[in-house]
Amino acid sequence: GKPIRLGDFARMAAKGEKIASLTCYDSSFAALLDRSGVELFLVGDSMGNVLQGHGSTLPVTLEQVEYHTASVLRGTRRAMVMADLPFGSYQESREQAFRSAARLMAAGAHMVKIEGGAWLAETVRFLVERGIPVCAHIGLTPQSVNTLGGYRVQGARPEGAARLEADAKALEEAGAALCVIEMVPAALGAAITAACPRMPTIGIGAGPDCAGQILVLHDMIGVYPGRTARFTKDFLAGAGSIDAAIAAYVAAVKEGRFPAPEHCY
Ligand code: KIV
Ligand code: NA
């Protein structure tokens, strides 16, 4: 098929067609995922966990994300590729964020992702005005694990939920094209999705009503040796091949069968 463009996600969301997304770190998997109809790849800083064996995403560097982004691009024909701005590469100022994001775009990324709420709205606007599409990331933001006090559900209480919804609206208003929502109650994922029609939501542990779903590739094929969250599912178990596992994931997302209640909060 034709390469996916930025506007396709809003069109899909408006039609209720679910967006299938996975993390991807190399060209071989990129080719496989691309053939299987995954529309959005994330060169995630989860590479710190699943490729490098760290206990968090904090040690990942901009150089590492650039390297993996360039590798993924060589295997990609149709999907849109977004790359994570790693810890320390954008929080200081919007100028720092632009410099870092420009390097990922030069490595081939089509979009960058940044973790944070309303405080980042000015940065999002700064990047978008200068030609860099941005995916926001709210809820559980792993780069902030040390201030969040662990990998735990966010927005479970009314004040927290209201703050996350306000964050989402500020980011949409600032021009974010997409928003990853991680580890929040399913009802909050649905509420934010409904409140932000111009910023399709990509959920991970955020319930079935987000505009799309994402998982970490290694969790989706059951090869990560560490502890995995409730929201993950091993699609290789029972599928027989990696190709079939990816196809099963895409089908389950498209048909609204993933996430099931047991993957939700
Ligand atoms: O780095 C990553 O894999 C992510 C996803 C969990 C959304 O940010
Ligand atoms: Na990430």
Image (cartoon, rainbow, N blue to C red):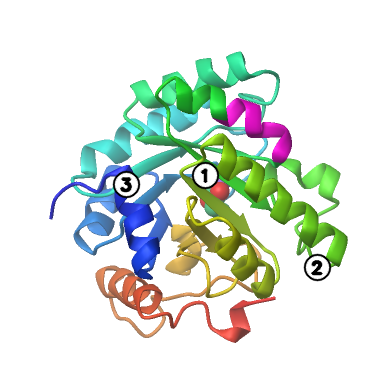
What is the three-letter code of the residue carrying label 1? Met
Residue at the image position 25 percent from the left and 62 percent from the top? 37
Whole-percent x, y for residue 43 in the image = 44, 42
Looking at the rendering, the stretch of residues picked out in magenta corresponds to 118-124
Q: Is residue 23 above or below residue 68?
A: below
Whole-percent x, y for residue 34 in the image = 24, 55
Q: Secondary structure at mark 3?
A: helix
Q: Is residue 100 magenta?
A: no
Q: Secondary structure at mark 2?
A: loop
Q: Secondary structure at mark 1?
A: helix
Answer with the quarter of the image where residue 114 lies: top right
- The residue carrying mark 3 is 7
For the residues labelled 3 and 2, the Cα–Cα distance comes to 32 Å
Label 3 or label 2, whichever comes before in sequence order: 3
Answer with the quarter of the image where residue 241 lies: bottom left
What is the three-letter code of the residue carrying label 3? Gly
Question: Would the CB of label 1 be found within 8 Å of ligand 1?
Answer: yes
State the quadrant of the C terminus. Answer: bottom right
Q: Is residue 241 above or below residue 257?
A: above
- The residue carrying mark 2 is 156
Residue at the image position 37 percent from the left and 85 percent from the top? 238
Question: Would the CB of label 2 be found within 8 Å of ligand 1?
Answer: no
Question: Would the CB of label 3 be found within 8 Å of ligand 1?
Answer: no
Is residue 55 something that shows in the picture? no
Q: Is residue 88 above or below residue 224?
A: above
